[in-house]
Image (cartoon, coloured by chain):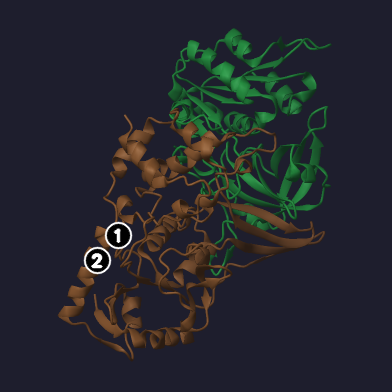
Chain colours: A green, B brown
């Protein structure tokens, strides 16, 4: 497993308190999908000193507080190689996310993090990386892609392939990023939607079938697959058929979380805590665990 | 370490002296049961209660606890953490099982990378004055899980009832400092002998040790066993086995208040409730009683050993006493141990 980076923590009496959130200002809200269920929030540190100490890696997450409603965990969608605010894309589904969707630019929220392990970037170095994403789970994959493509990092990785699907074009996240990546020579992007749609000229079909069609070589390649459970379930056999051993496949789990630091217990699966030992696990690790995710 | 005797008629005077300098929590009546609560006079102590209703974890990890208060206006967020602990506390009359449970919780909350200051601040100012169990209850099984009725792990001072007096043993520097003043005499050979005899008598009342290694190994292969269906067929999912377990430390965090002012609170929680893992999407990774009863035993007798090399059970028997449908953990462990 990778080591986690240390977060800046507010301290009282010089001992850091991991439960106190940092104040963050909502700098920009962007409606991400045409059903308006996903909004992207760019959060800026309200105090400059907090920004300096916030050091994260792709795949880590934060607990965002909407005061009076509570906290919920969200993967960081921005990359540490990007300057500026932290980016989170939020699906309106529960109490905290609905409250967040109802907030306005300029308002204050709280943030704890970065939490979790993140993607094993050191392990990926010198290898090809296949990124497989589905639906609104592309958040930390955006972070990862930006990281890999950063001029300071690109040469340390081999071929980069993205396979990303959504039910229809309007539900794809980060359309500007996708368009920019499609124009690049050093990454191959395969976008797919479930059914034909007017004006759509790219892949049509479910992600597992597109993985089979694109058929990335498993040779010296790591696959990162994040998406709805059903997509993962049907894609894993395709990756296996292409020769990917479970040690070369990584996924990021979602679980209900509260503390985010391996204490409150609810994200426990087998001997692991998703918040602390994950959320990124190799398929080899997942195969040893009860199916409690 | 130092051993002294204190005649029973002097013990309340000793406790009264402690009450001058410390907040003292002891087994005492509250409503219709005995629980660890703050006392103001030695006479409040209930001496003959081995297993309090609430375990003493409540003192360092309260059932409900405000983490911080918040006020928020357009420009400023103000947080006031409630982590500071001023006065030192004494847990008086802690039983060996409950002390062992606190050691297990220490390993969870007091980790170098993320110290839970709400727990550790209280814990660092809490001293344990334990007492041995001369007459273990029929539901006690500390010896099955590696404990004992006179085990002194985690104690600063330990009392053994030797009839007319207590044998008082200091186990830490702090315990040694507490162990002086009026009423304490040098322990005699007869006192030490009486203490040994009390321990031997108590041990005879307790069940034989179980192999926690074998239980762990068997559990490794029981993820898909029908065993869990049998338990969940009777289990009501009330959660009392976990909420009142001295080892269980799961908690929930909720906000109480408005968007502009209020407090963030944590409360004991239990893996036995379906809402514990229920996600906002409606997906629940542990949707049924089968997965939840399995989680309780797997966590205590398998995962805990992997992570901490400690069994997540101290044999206090609260879950056995309080289960409304008489699910007996000792029976379950015996069945797991005997499983093929």
Q: Measured along the vertical axis of the image, is residue B17 above or below residue A106?
A: below
Q: Which secondary structure, mark 1?
A: loop
Q: Name which residue lies at 24% across and 59% down.
A: B204
Q: Which secondary structure, mark 2?
A: helix
Q: Residues within 10 Å of mark 2 (few under 14, many from 20)?
A: many
Q: Nearer the viewer, residue A57 or A72?
A: A72
Indicate the position of residue A175 as horizontal and vertical percent values.
75, 26
Indicate the position of residue A199 as horizontal and vertical percent values.
83, 11
> Which quarter of the image is occupied by the N terminus of chain A?
top left
Say whether residue A169 is visible: yes
Distance between the Cα atoms at labels 2 and 1?
Answer: 9 Å
Q: Nearer the viewer, residue B88 or A242?
A: B88
Asked whether, in this view, residue B331 is left or right of residue B73, the answer is: left
Q: Earlier in the sequence, mark 2 or mark 1?
A: 1
- Residue B212, label in figure: none
- Residue B199, label in figure: 2
Q: Name which residue lies at 36% across and 71% down.
A: B130
Query: Can you tell which of label 2 and label 1 is closer to the viewer?
Result: 2
Q: Residue furthest top?
A: A213
Residue highlighted by disc 1: B148
Indicate the position of residue A211 as horizontal and vertical percent values.
59, 13
């Amino acid at each position: 497993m990778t080591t986690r980076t240390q977060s800046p923590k507010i301290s009282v009496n010089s001992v850091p308190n991991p439960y106190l959130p940092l104040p963050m200002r909502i700098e920009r809200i962007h409606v991400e999908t045409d059903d308006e269920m996903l909004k992207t929030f760019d959060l800026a540190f309200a105090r400059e000193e907090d920004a300096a100490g916030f050091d994260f890696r792709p795949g880590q997450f934060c607990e965002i507080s909407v005061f009076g409603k509570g906290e919920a965990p969200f993967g960081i969608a921005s990359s540490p190689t990007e300057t500026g605010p932290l980016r989170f894309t939020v699906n309106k589904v529960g109490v905290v996310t609905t409250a967040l969707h109802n907030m306005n630019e300029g308002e204050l929220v709280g943030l704890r993090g970065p939490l979790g392990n993140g993607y094993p970037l050191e392990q990926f170095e010198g290898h090809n990386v296949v990124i497989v994403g589905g639906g609104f789970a592309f958040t930390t994959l955006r972070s990862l892609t930006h990281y890999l493509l950063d001029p300071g990092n690109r040469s340390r990785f081999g071929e980069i392939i993205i396979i990303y699907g959504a039910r229809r074009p309007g539900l794809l996240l980060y359309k500007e990023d996708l368009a920019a990546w499609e124009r690049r020579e050093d990454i191959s992007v395969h976008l797919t939607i479930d059914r034909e749609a007017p004006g759509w000229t790219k892949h049509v079909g479910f992600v597992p079938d597109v993985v089979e069609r694109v058929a990335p070589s498993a040779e010296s390649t790591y696959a990162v697959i994040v998406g709805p459970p059903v997509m993962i379930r049907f894609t894993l056999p395709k990756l296996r058929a292409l020769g990917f051993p479970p040690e070369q496949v990584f996924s990021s789990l979602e679980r209900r979380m509260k503390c985010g630091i391996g204490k409150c217990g609810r994200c426990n699966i087998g001997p692991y805590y998703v918040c602390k030992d994950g959320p990124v696990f190799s398929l080899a690790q997942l195969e040893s665990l009860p199916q409690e995710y | 370490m130092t051993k002294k005797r204190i005649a029973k008629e002097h013990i309340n005077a000793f406790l009264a002296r402690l009450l001058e300098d410390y907040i003292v929590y002891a087994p005492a009546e509250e409503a219709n049961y005995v629980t660890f609560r703050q006392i103001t006079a030695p006479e409040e102590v209930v001496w003959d209660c081995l297993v309090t209703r609430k375990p003493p974890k409540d003192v360092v990890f309260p059932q409900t606890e405000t983490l911080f208060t918040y006020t928020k206006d357009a420009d400023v967020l103000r947080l006031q953490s409630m982590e500071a602990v001023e006065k030192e506390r004494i847990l008086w009359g802690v039983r060996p099982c409950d002390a062992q449970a606190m050691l297990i919780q220490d390993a969870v909350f007091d980790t170098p990378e993320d110290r839970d200051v709400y727990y550790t601040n209280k814990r660092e100012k809490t001293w344990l004055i334990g007492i041995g169990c001369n007459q273990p209850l029929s539901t006690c099984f500390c010896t099955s899980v590696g404990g004992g009725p006179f085990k002194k792990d985690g104690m600063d001072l330990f009392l053994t009832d030797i009839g007319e007096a207590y044998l008082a043993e200091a186990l830490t520097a702090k315990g040694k400092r507490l162990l002086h003043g009026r009423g304490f005499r040098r322990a005699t050979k007869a006192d030490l002998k009486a203490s040994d005899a009390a321990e031997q008598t108590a041990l005879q009342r307790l069940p034989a040790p179980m192999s926690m290694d074998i239980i762990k190994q068997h559990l490794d292969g029981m993820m898909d066993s029908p065993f869990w269906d049998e338990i969940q067929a009777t289990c009501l999912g009330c959660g009392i086995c976990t909420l009142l377990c001295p080892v269980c430390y799961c908690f929930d965090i909720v906000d109480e208040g408005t968007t502009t002012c209020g407090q963030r609170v944590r409360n004991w929680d239990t893996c036995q409730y379906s809402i514990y893992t229920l996600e906002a999407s409606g997906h629940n990774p542990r949707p049924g009683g089968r997965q939840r009863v399995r989680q309780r035993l797997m966590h205590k007798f398998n995962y805990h050993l992997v992570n901490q090399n400690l069994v997540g059970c101290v044999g206090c028997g609260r879950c056995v006493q309080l289960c409304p449908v008489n699910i007996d953990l000792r029976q379950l462990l015996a069945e797991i141990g005997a499983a093929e």
